């Protein structure tokens, strides 16, 4: 009969207990890691199962096509009103331009309400984010409201600054013109004073006629000066109205570009980080359409603001390259970027909300209200009807793209 020494069996029991504890610890760690991975990628399938068709090589090729297509669409849209402003059919005061701008305003309005605000709501209420505070308060609408009010303040301040600057420039020009006119009249009177003694000596030999001629010229010069002075005052209100309109176009074009650029980066980045051809294909068509008409609206505002060629070109190029640059940046970061991380969702949601607020304000206040409530529109019933049809068509067209993108 074999006898076991208890002292010899103690190390074996200790090792078996250690193995059992290690097995339990490893099982707990695996469970925690699995739960952590599921939590970090809980919204990875937000696209409704589109990642089933994930194909990195095909997605990369589609991204290159997207960069080219979006770039061409943006350049074409923003360049058309800038190049066509010297052509009769696309002048900023032409009917075709007004209708195209109304359609573009509808596109921008739908982009803010249907696309950007919805995407912000989706990101900020994602299950990956903690319930408190993100799902207990409508942050997307609140941030969009703050962005719209902030745009209003910026709009007002910039308009006041530009109007004051233009007013000072106009006053300087008028003062210089008045000084030049006064100097001209002074020289005429000096000439009369110098000639008068000679005329007195010739009074008996026709000098009276000569004196009469000089007097007529002096009176005409003085009358012309007074008439120009009164004429200038008569046109002061018209000049101020033109300056105010010009300032509005300058401010609107700059703020509109700010709103467009802010959301173009996010749109491009979202497309760039995607590895699903099923997601990218519809986005190419949607973003090309969206980029063309946003560019047309921006180009129209730049054209109406009458920027110099260099400034207009810089603004147009900055708009055209923003979305393609976002796509390129997203493509470079696709391997490291986790669209389902809490930080990425919060940043995306906040930027989408800000963009939505800016676009909604610009579309309603500076594009739609400014044109549809103008005197020109109110005096032309046919133009009213056609513009409303174009506006609703633009909004409906951009809204319908939400089915695919």
Image (cartoon, rainbow, N blue to C red):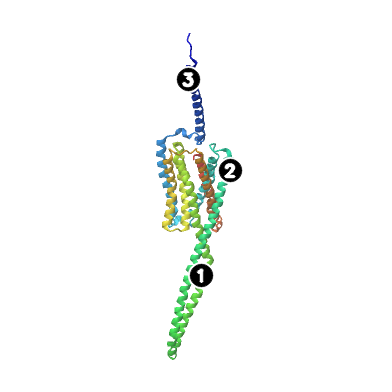
Where does label 2 land, which residue?
A: 138
Taking depth in this image into account, of 125 and 75 the one nearest to the observer is 125
Q: Is residue 354 above or below residue 93?
A: above
Q: Are there few (<14), some (14-19), or many (20+) residues within 10 Å of tag 1?
A: few
CA gap, disc 3 and disc 2:
62 Å
Q: Are marks 1 and 2 in contact (CB under 8 Å)?
A: no
Residue at 57% from the left image edge and 44% from the top image edge: 139
Residue 166 image offset from top left, x and y in percent: 49, 63
Q: Which comes sooner in the sequence, label 1 or label 3? A: 3
CA gap, disc 1 and disc 3:
110 Å
Q: Tell me the mark number nearer the camera, choosing from 1 and 3.
A: 3
Taking depth in this image into account, of 1 and 284 the one nearest to the observer is 1
- Secondary structure beneath disc 1? helix
Taking depth in this image into account, of 203 and 269 the one nearest to the observer is 269
Where does label 3 land, which residue?
A: 11
Where does label 1 land, which residue?
A: 232
Q: Which comes sooner in the sequence, label 3 or label 2? A: 3
Q: Quadrant of residue 62?
A: top left
Residue 372 image offset from top left, x and y in percent: 55, 54
* Residue 108 visible in rendering: yes
Residue 203 image offset from top left, x and y in percent: 44, 90
Taking depth in this image into account, of 146 and 246 the one nearest to the observer is 146
Residue 213 image offset from top left, x and y in percent: 45, 83
**310 left or right, relative to 394:** left
Q: Are there few (<14), some (14-19), or many (20+) residues within 10 Å of tag 2?
A: few
- Secondary structure beneath disc 3? helix
Q: Are marks 1 and 3 in contact (CB under 8 Å)?
A: no
Q: Residue furthest bottom?
A: 204
Q: Which comes sooner in the sequence, label 1 or label 2? A: 2
- Secondary structure beneath disc 2? loop
Residue at 50% from the left image edge and 77% from the top image edge: 223
Q: Are there few (<14), some (14-19), or many (20+) residues within 10 Å of tag 3?
A: few
């Amino acid at each position: 009969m074999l006898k076991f020494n208890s002292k010899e069996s103690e190390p074996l029991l200790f090792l078996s207990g250690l193995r059992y504890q290690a097995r339990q610890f490893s099982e707990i760690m695996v469970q925690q890691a699995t739960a952590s991975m599921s939590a970090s990628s809980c919204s990875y399938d937000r696209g409704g199962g589109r990642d089933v068709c994930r194909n990195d090589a095909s997605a990369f090729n589609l991204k290159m096509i997207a960069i080219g297509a979006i770039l061409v669409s943006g350049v074409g849209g923003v360049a058309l009103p800038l190049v066509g402003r010297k052509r009769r059919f696309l002048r900023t005061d032409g009917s075709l331009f007004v209708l195209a701008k109304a359609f573009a305003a509808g596109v921008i309005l739908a982009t803010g309400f249907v696309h950007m605000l919805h995407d912000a709501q989706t990101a900020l209420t994602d299950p990956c984010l903690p319930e408190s505070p993100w799902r207990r308060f409508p942050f997307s609408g609140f941030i969009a409201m703050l962005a719209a009010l902030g745009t209003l303040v910026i709009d007002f301040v910039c308009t006041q600054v530009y109007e004051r600057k233009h007013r000072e420039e106009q006053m300087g020009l008028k003062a210089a013109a008045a000084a030049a006119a006064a100097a001209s009249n002074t020289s005429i009177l000096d000439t009369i004073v110098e000639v008068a003694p000679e005329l007195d000596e010739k009074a008996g030999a026709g000098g009276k006629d000569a004196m009469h001629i000089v007097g007529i010229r002096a009176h005409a010069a003085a009358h012309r000066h007074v008439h120009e002075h009164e004429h200038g005052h008569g046109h002061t209100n018209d000049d101020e109205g033109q300056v105010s309109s010009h300032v509005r176009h300058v401010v609107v074009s700059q703020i509109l570009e700010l709103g467009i650029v802010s959301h173009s980066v996010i749109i491009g980045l979202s497309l760039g980080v995607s590895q699903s051809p099923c997601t990218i294909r519809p986005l190419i068509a949607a973003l090309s359409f969206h980029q063309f008409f946003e560019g047309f609206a921006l180009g129209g505002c730049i054209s109406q603001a009458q920027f110099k060629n260099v400034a207009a070109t810089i603004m147009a190029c900055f708009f055209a390259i923003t979305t393609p640059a976002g796509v390129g940046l997203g493509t470079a970061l696709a391997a490291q970027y986790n669209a389902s991380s809490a930080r990425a969702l919060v940043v995306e949601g906040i930027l989408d909300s800000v963009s939505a607020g800016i676009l909604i304000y610009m579309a309603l206040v500076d594009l739609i209200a400014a044109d549809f409530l103008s005197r020109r529109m109110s005096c032309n019933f046919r133009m009213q009807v056609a513009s409303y049809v174009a506006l609703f068509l633009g909004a409906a067209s951009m809204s319908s793209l939400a089915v695919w993108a």
